[in-house]
Amino acid sequence: MSNTPEQQKKKIILSGIQPTGIFTLGNYLGAIKNWVTLQEEYNCCYMIADLHAITVRQETAALRSGILDAAALVLACGVDPEKSLVFLQSGVHTHAELSWILSCYTQFGELSRMTQFKDKSARHADNVNAGLFTYPVLMAADILVYQADLVPVGADQKQHLELARNIAERFNAVHGNTFTVPEPYIPKAGARIMSLADPTKKMSKSDTNVNGFISILDDKDTIIRKFRRAVTDSDACVRYGEGKDGINNLLTIYSTVTGKTIAEAEAEFDGKGYGDFKTAVGEAVADHLAPVRDNFSRIRADKDALLAITSSGAEKALSITERTMRKVYKKVGFIR
Ligand code: ATP
Ligand code: LTN
């Protein structure tokens, strides 16, 4: 990202993804696909949220390689380091620094209402740590430290975004205009891809049931097999509707990867059985993801090149965020 006057005028985008496993089709359709599209029009900052990942216990060696996998996957999906900044969150110390300050502008009650906290503390009852609780404050800091205008995320992050806006508005009300109040950017279709094994739950990369998610590196046979096993209903009619969570999910996926509308997809499979439909969805997804798999093996194999991209990204990111930190320190009353 250079600093021509034209680029200075462009709006700023910040988003992140946790290095907690190979990205799923949900991560791709809900978030990363938009990261790629938006980089043409905005100044984009994309980070691997490694600080967030340790709110759940991670094995050290697995996290280290997971971080490199995540950075390589972001690039393999089409994020171009010539256009966007790509970096590791822990490599830009201002995120954690601002997070502390913002935590003093966030209420206990607000954090207690976060549904992700409630879900994750139920799932990891033996490790309900303070980081899991203050997770959304760090996320607010990630966003506000860049003065981001837009944040492309899936629907599950909407509540965290709302909180980031509230924190920004509160700080601005106390200290005068300091932070840009960010807007969420949530896709109309694909914002909440559901698990193939239980279509009432969102597809998640840390699901212990591998049949519930499509990994974006799964090969064609695996993808088709997982779709063929997808839980549906006994109605045997490829139509979007109430009580048909499984089919609704497959129709959404099919329409997002092929660019067809739901109505066009319904017409295409009119009179056909679920078996034919599931195979067609599997094939469409596998074809869509094939280039990502090829790119990933190439990019992940060159660790030095990958780290050169993330360190150069972090260096530029740090200089952007230090501007905000100077302003914040002054407003709060700290002496530098
Ligand atoms: P974990 O299982 O470790 O909590 P995750 O799969 O939920 O991870 P995140 O790293 O928390 O993934 O999310 C990265 C991005 O992907 C976020 O913008 C999030 O909203 C989006 N996302 C996650 N799951 C889905 C989904 N099922 N459908 C659409 N978007 C999703
Ligand atoms: N909490 C996000 C990941 C994340 C993020 C961010 C997304 C961390 N910091 C800042 C957008 C902006 C998630 O997807 N679970």
Image (cartoon, grey):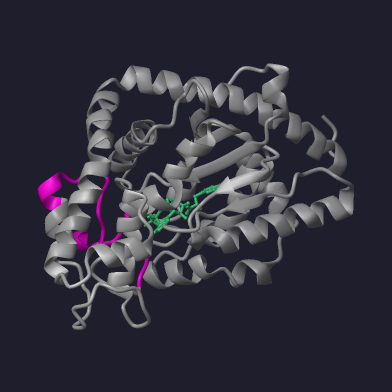
- The segment highlighted magenta reads 201-222
Q: In the rendered image, which quarter contains the C terminus?
A: top right
In this view, the residue in front, 132 or 233, is 233
For the point 34% across and 57% down, the residue is 255
Q: Main secondary structure of the magenta part?
A: loop
Front one among 30 and 164: 30
147, above or below 1, in the image? below
Give coordinates of residue 104: x percent, y percent: 74, 55
Can you say which quadrant of the picture contains the N terminus? top right
Q: Where is residue 325 in the image (x, y as percent from the top left)?
A: 74, 35
Residue 209 image offset from top left, x and y in percent = 21, 63
Q: Position of residue 160 (x, y in %)?
A: 59, 59
Q: Which residue is drawn at 23% across and 50% down?
A: 284
Q: Quadrant of residue 240?
A: bottom left
Residue 64: quarter of image: top left
Q: Is residue 105 magenta?
A: no
